[in-house]
Amino acid sequence: MHDAKLHDDDARLAALRRLDVLDSAVEEPFENIVTLIRTVLGVPIATVTLVDRDRQWFKARRGLDVAETARSVSFCTHTIQQREPLIVPDALDDPRFADSPLVTGPPH
């Protein structure tokens, strides 16, 4: 079933602008979320990510040194286009991500 709301990028971006959160200061609640996720799931990287028109910006991050990356290489672009969780057992085996610098480069 096609979900029009998931593919209305202009409306999603307008909502993101209304929140006025892009490039905002560090906030403890978001920092707590990434710390908790990293601890509970035992993963090396955790982020709270906002997907802008041409980039994904990390409101909070652990295990990643950059504040943003190009949207064209982001996993989150795929995540926001579906209601189900995005599960990628091995990004090197997934043609959507195999050549991404987020997969082939540090800090993987």
Image (cartoon, rainbow, N blue to C red):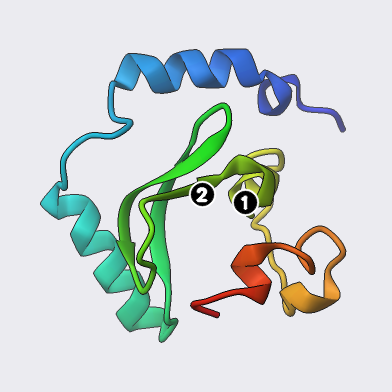
Quadrant in the picture for the N terminus: top right
Percent across and percent down for residue 66 are 38, 58
Mark 2 nearby-residue class (10 Å; few <14, some 14–19, many ≥20)? some
Q: Would residue 97 be found to the left or right of residue 67 on screen?
A: right
How far from the left and from the top, in percent, is residue 84? 69, 51
| Residue found 16% across the figure and 40% down from its top | 25
Q: Which mark is residue 47?
A: none
Q: Is residue 18 above or below residue 2?
A: above
At horizontal 34% and vertical 14% (from top left) the residue drawn is: 18
- Write the residue at 35% across / 71% down: 37
8 relative position to 1: left or right? left
Judge the density around disc 1: few (<14), some (14-19), many (≥20) Cα neighbours within 10 Å.
some
Q: Amino acid at mark 2?
A: Thr
**Pointer 1 residue:** 74
Which mark sits nearer the N-terminus, 2 or 1? 2
- Mark 2 touching mark 1, by CB under 8 A? yes
Q: How many marks?
A: 2
Q: CA distance from mark 2 to mark 1?
A: 7 Å
Residue of label 2? 69
Query: Where 28 falls versus 108 (above or below)?
Result: above
Q: Nearer the viewer, residue 45 or 103?
A: 103
Give the quadrant of the C terminus: bottom right
Quarter of the image where one finds residue 3: top right
